[in-house]
Image (tube, rainbow, N blue to C red):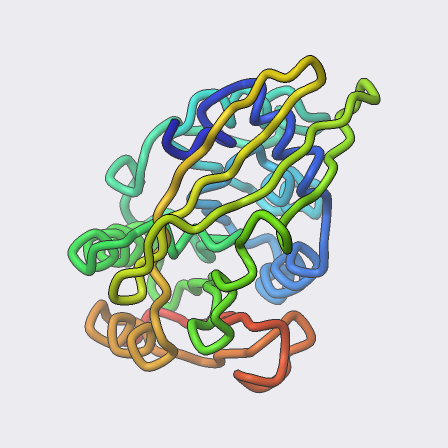
Amino acid sequence: MRHGEFEDPRLVTVYDAECPWGRDDDFFLAAVDETPAARVLDLGCGTGRLTVAMAAAGHPVTGVDPARASLAAARAKPGADQVTWIEGTSHALPSGTFDVAVLTSHVAQVFVDDAEWTATLADLRRALLPGGRLLFDARDPADRRWERWNPVDSARLITLPDGREVRAWTEVTSVLQNAVSFVHHYVFPGGDELLSSATLRFRTERELRDSLRAAGFAVDHVYGGWGREPVGAGDGELVVLAHLSA
């Protein structure tokens, strides 16, 4: 299944167990808080971990995601009633509504084709108010993270809320012009195995800056990690903070 962690309820539970609150969430929540009482768009909100936290911090928040199973998990979280949830893509965004838009957990890499990424940036520009901010992360291709996505280095045990353990590993199936395809394997107690496949685009810092400029955004900062390190000296990330230019 494509993007099974978001589409299959069984794998949504695994995803939530494997991806608790982290330093990236701390970073984005602090960055959003720099705009007090900001009207926030969380595009690709997934199961709503950060979405709900931003609402709890006092921001009016809208979470948007095309995956129904992920949104069902998000809506079941404590505090979810403070969030407006929309099942859909960036095309469904209202115009001129938000002060800040975030795309976290490397959602920006899901837009593999340049045309997809360009269209998404155009939708975000339309949805933001004048001077609105755009915050997102993407893995730095110079870090070559995909080389560690193999059955040995990626092998892990994931403990579910009911105490069961799921064995998981990842294998890369192709690398073509900075588009990396891979499959996650999940083996449940009893032997049932579920697969989740995806392709991610690894854009360079220059590619990201150029695409943002073309879409009408001005880049304020690009960091290499969650401690605001320079690119190449942090966590292998490209953490981008931008705003709508005049």
Residue 137 showing in the rendered view: no
Q: For this view, does 45 lie left or right of residue 108?
A: right
Residue 24 showing in the rendered view: yes
Please tell me which residue lies in front, 106 or 129.
106
Tell me the residue at 37%/47% (across/down).
Answer: 97
| Residue 11 drawn at (x, y percent) | 56, 25
Farthest residue to the front: give it: 152
Residue 113, located in which quarter of the rendered image?
Answer: bottom left
Tell me the residue at 51%/65% (across/down).
Answer: 145
Please tell me which residue lies in front, 234 or 48.
234
Farthest residue to the top: give it: 190
Tell me the residue at 59%/42% (across/down).
Answer: 169
Residue 65, located in which quarter of the rendered image?
Answer: top left
Quadrant for the N terminus, please: top left
Please tell me which residue lies in front, 189 or 138.
189
Quadrant for the C terminus, please: bottom left
| Residue 5 drawn at (x, y percent) | 51, 31
Q: Does residue 88 lie above or below 76 as drawn? A: below
Farthest residue to the left: give it: 115
* Total number of numbered discs in the rendering: 0
| Residue 91 drawn at (x, y percent) | 24, 39
| Residue 120 drawn at (x, y percent) | 26, 52
Please tell me which residue lies in front, 166 or 241.
166
Q: For this view, does 48 lie left or right of residue 136?
A: right
Q: Does residue 95 lie above or below 29 as drawn? A: above
Q: Does residue 180 lie above or below 84 as drawn? A: below
Q: Does residue 56 lie above or below 189 as drawn? A: below
